[in-house]
Amino acid sequence: MKRSLIDSLKENKVSKISGFVDKVRDTRYMVFVMLRDTSSFIQVSLDKELNSNLIEDALKLTQGSVVSFEGVMKVNPNVKNGGKEFIPSKIEIVTIANPMPIDNEANIDSRLNYRWVDLRSEKNQLIFKVQSYFVNAMRSYLLDNDFVEIHTPKFIATASESGSEVFEVKYFDGKAYLAQSPQFYKQMAMAAGFEKYFEVAPCFRAEKSRTRKHATEFTSFDVEISFIDSYEDVMNLEAEMLTYALKKTKEKYGQKLEELYGITLNVPTLPFPMMRLADIYDELEKRYGFKVDDSEKTDLTTEAERLCEKLAKDKFNHEFLFVTDFPADKRAFYHMRQNGHLQGYDLIWKGIEITSGAQREHRLNELAKNAKEKGLTKDVEFYLEFFKYGMPAHGGFAIGVDRLTMILLNIPIKEAQFLFRGPDRLTP
């Protein structure tokens, strides 16, 4: 018999269900097995007299065991957890589980040691259902707007994109580096005339950061677009894409997020509010008495970034805030500059930066000059080749999928990733 998911069962229809055992309860007259699959859970009720041929096997089951039952689903208002139960006529034990190595009270690092067990809960599986749906909604928005998905190399020959440290790896008789981002290659796509590009792929940062929002390997959602008039075109695209994805995710999972995480998913209004960096520091001081030395005002400090959540809510009644007018010398050489200011932005969501976006410098002479000022010459020669044969005005952004998930569910990055990688963790 073909297996049915628990949430698709029809009353009195003979069906087969399979899943993990949550618990087994042995009473005087009955044995109850709580069974869970990826869709839901159900109580399997075995009468010791009527199902005497199944009881011996049912009592062998332990938490985490995998088992299949054939039988029928009955509606029973006396049954908790949905008022449904499964009355079996056949049992097939697939595997018997050893005693569980962790419980619900284990700390996060212990849980990560046994991540495959930790992820069996409905609450933890919801993380990745929501993440998958959110990413697919962003992808759908872009595909509907004629973007092309391209997969760029993760082995790169030079480690020159930014100040972040990179992982060096042996590459046959030479060496290579793991890509920090697809930045150079997505600009190559613009030179190739694709005009609208996106990619969802792993990126690697050899940073020894031990915060709730950093990881050494993460998934990046990169977007690049040609023939823009300014970086505001890039901002508008990102705001529209995120609003679309949040609306679709709320429709699909809003109720479950409230039930399991106590989260009300808000769909933002357009346009997203925007403030200059200097104005943000002025407002933070005026409204909340927050002060920093002038030397720190070339970027958002961690505390200033956190306070942007309150500022966005108090000033604009919004969860998102675009920050503009960063000093150009603090950002990568390929960002366009104008009057000493970056032609780009950061996007803050609930007090955490999720995006750095910008209009790119498409003029070869300006780009070469910027690279030289950063001390980059030989390392970027291959990159500068892209600009010698025609390059449109273009810009783009990148969003960390794991960080998006972290903010959406208000959980640490370690829980937002299927398997976390950090300075102190390389297994499982």
Image (cartoon, rainbow, N blue to C red):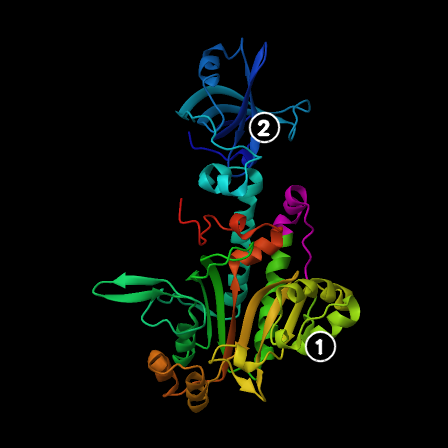
Residue identified by numbered label 1: 279
What residue is rendered at 45% in x and 13% in y? Answer: 56
* Three-letter code for the amino acid on which mark 1 is drawn: Asp
**Residue with the most extreme left position:** 173
Residue 45 or residue 358, whichever sits in front:
358
Give x and y (percent) for residue 90.
45, 20
Q: Is residue 404 above or below residue 85?
A: below
Look at label 2 and name its amino acid.
Glu
Local crowd at mark 2 within 10 Å, few (<14), some, or many (≥20)? some
Secondary structure under tag 2 reads loop
In this rendering, is residue 320 above or below 371? above
Residue at 56%, 75% in the rendered image: 234
**Which residue position is annotated with label 2?**
11
Q: Nearer the viewer, residue 325 or 89?
A: 325
Q: Secondary structure at mark 1?
A: helix
From the viewer's side, name the closer residue of 394 and 162.
162
User: In the image, 311: left or right of 199?
Assistant: right
Q: Quadrant of the N terminus?
A: top left
Which residue occupies 72% across, 70% down? 291
Was residue 70 drawn as part of the magenta stretch in this picture? no
Whether residue 119 is visible here, answered yes or no, is no
Give the magenta part as a residue range: 251-268
Residue 275 visible in this rendered orientation of the protein: yes
The percent coordinates of residue 185 (x first, y second) are 39, 73
Residue 328, percent across and down? 55, 81
Q: Nearer the viewer, mark 2 or mark 1?
A: 1
- The answer to which quarter of the image holds residue 190 is bottom left
Are the residues at dot 2 and dot 1 in contact (C-beta closer than 8 Å)?
no
